[in-house]
Amino acid sequence: MTPEQEGRFVVFVKAVGLPHNGDQAHWPSSGTTDQQDEYASVVEVDVTKA
């Protein structure tokens, strides 16, 4: 995907292991929550023209 404009973009990263057998299946296990109220690691990306 190519951004339509320059700027800072925030990406939420998370993983769920299968089989889903409890809290140990989730990464990260604490910190910021996303729109699904699940913990996520926050990564910021600065997009500039080449």
Image (spheres, rainbow, N blue to C red):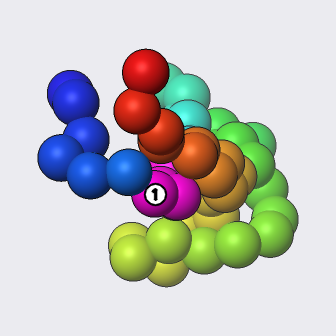
Q: Quadrant of residue 24?
A: top right
Majority secondary structure in the magenta region: strand
Residue 25 as seen in the image, left or right of residue 30: left
Q: Position of residue 7 (x, y in %)?
A: 46, 57
Q: Residue at x 22, y 30 (%)?
A: 2
* Quadrant of the snapshot with the N terminus: top left
Residue 15 belongs to the span the image colors magenta:
no
Nearer to us in this view, 35 or 4: 4
Residue 23 against residue 34 in the figure, above or below = above
Q: Please give the range of residues in magenta.
A: 7-12
Look at label 1 and name its amino acid.
Gly
Q: Quadrant of residue 26?
A: top right
Residue 22 seen anywhere in this rendered image of the structure:
no
Is label 1 in a helix, a strand or a loop? strand
Residue 27 against residue 33 in the figure, above or below = above
Residue 9 belongs to the span the image colors magenta:
yes
Residue 37 against residue 38 in the figure, above or below = below
Q: Mark 1: give few (<14), some (14-19) or many (20+) Cα within 10 Å.
A: few
Q: Position of residue 3 (x, y in %)?
A: 25, 41
Q: Position of residue 34 (x, y in %)?
A: 50, 71
Q: Residue at x 43, y 21 (%)?
A: 50
* Residue highlighted by disc 1: 7
